Amino acid sequence: MKMQRNSELATPDTNAMIAQAAPLVVDLDGTLTPTDTLVESVLQLIKQAPLNLFLLPFWLLRGIAYFKAKVAGATTFSARSLPYREDLLRFLTEQKADGRRLVLATAAHQSIAHAVATHIGLFDLVIASDANCNLKGERKLAAIREQVGHAFVYAGDSKVDLPIWRSAHAAILVDVGDSVSRAVRQSVPTEREFRTAKSLLKTWAKALRVHQWLKNLLIFVPLLTAFSFSSTAAVLTVLLAFLSFSFAASATYIVNDLSDLGSDRAHVRKRARPFASCAIKIVDGIGAAIALMSGAFLLSAFVSPSFSLVLLTYVVITTAYTWRLKEYVLLDVLTLAVLYTVRIVAGALAIGAPMSPWLLAFSVFIFFSLALVKRCSELVSLLSADIEAAKGRDYRTTDLVVLWPLGVAAAMSSVVIFCLFVSASVTRERYATPEVLWVVALGLIYWLTRLWIKTARGEMHDDPIVYALKNRGSCLTIAICVGAMVFGHFVEILPD
């Protein structure tokens, strides 16, 4: 009886020793990497040929295992570009150094699993899905028992892993929810737990690029140039148009980020973006993009049919830019210039203001210059990091010798167009004192030149439009220019 009690007292220590000595079986998606490799592969498949989207349902009808095999076979997977949980990797490296056997067991296709295992170089065995069997839940447990044995420790992240944890000697929990954590702890001892600190509100604001909504203030330009800001109805209509464009813009930013996962992860700063770093799940991003785009067109219906048409045009051009146009040198910046100008056209249609050809010409040149500021600032960053070419874009640091004078020339061309507008007869009809507009011309020269100097110094770390609206000196210059326009319109200081 005494020996039995001693044996019972020793059981927890014995179990702990067995658990520590047992092979460590590690899940891939959501555990070793915070992303979902299948979802990323599907996105890559659609990006390389959008018509592939129509093949996916037919593949899925033949089963998830067949679906994964077809997607894996049609895409080029790069294990090097994946984000990994560094804290878990450090732990696995320590365990490997102590002689522990490590096994990668995943429902991902075997080609993806072997690529990851080869890249990391820690695993002794890989267990993964093939075209005939999707290793998830009970099927994964059966495969682990067959190839590893009944004594193992399992590292996972989701509810579907519960059957495996319950059969394991111990559990390693990776960013699991509270309910799953409680269920696991009631079944088996927990060897380690890894949690990532999250700030969802801040992360989502970053993903939606709320700060980029500042660019949609361009919708208010026709309200200013038509001097309709005294009309409450016009102001409310433009506010509705602003929200509509902002929702659509956020949706397209999400789609852009999801299509750019590979190039963003190779970028010095962009790799910290929410989807590239997997701070937000890709499927959540897809859902948010659909909801935002639906909301954008719902709001546009309350503005006007013509505004909805322009919003649709904006979305089409942005989508074309995301999937193809941004990959071509100069064509991408021309597209950006058009997208900026479309915002002004949308603002005019929202309030029914006539579109001035002077304003359109001025917009194209100034926004072409600002788009080149964006590209040159990126190339300056690459140059300082000794990187020759931009990943995912047809630009090299040697292109600066062409892009720089081209951007400055476009900026000065916009100033020339504005100066011609000041001297035009239509301006003298609309402004009480058009001579005041020369203050605006000087302000434009200063403002644009300052942006290019900041770019040359490597200080342009944001979109130039956003920078212009956030920088104190830039805001002061814009305020003076706007004030001069309003003053010149209403106040006559040089009567005939």
Image (tube, rainbow, N blue to C red):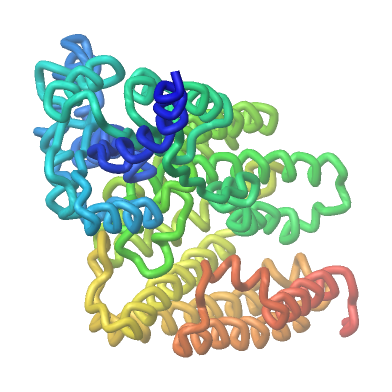
Q: Is residue 196 left or right of residue 18?
A: right
Q: Quadrant of the C terminus?
A: bottom right
Residue in the picture at 76% in, 72% down: 482
Front one among 265 and 253: 265
229 shown above or below 377? above
Question: Left or right: 211 with respect to 122?
Answer: right
Residue shown at 51% from the left, 46% from the top: 195
In percent of width and height, residue 297 lies at: 57, 30
Above/below status of 346 relative to 45: below
Residue 89 percent across, percent down from the top left: 32, 54
Image spot of residue 400 (x, y percent)? 31, 83
Instruction: Tell how many labels.
Output: 0
- At 75% from the left and 67% from the top, the residue drawn is 429
Q: Relative to 336, does residue 79 appear above or below in the rendering?
A: above
Observer-nearest of 225 and 177: 177
User: Quadrant of residue 188 in the image?
Assistant: top left
- Judged from this view, the residue extending furthest toward the front is 2
- Taking the spot 48% from the left edge, 71% from the top edge, the residue there is 370
Where residue 331 sits: x, y (%)?
30, 61
Is residue 442 toward the left or the right of residue 48 in the image? right
Q: Quadrant of the N terminus?
A: top left
Let me know if residue 106 appears in the view: yes
Q: From where the camera sits, is residue 253 visible?
A: no
Decide which of 146, 80 is in the foreground and name it: 146
Quadrant for residue 419, please give it: bottom right
Q: Nearer the viewer, residue 321 or 396?
A: 396
Q: Is residue 227 left or right of residue 346?
A: right
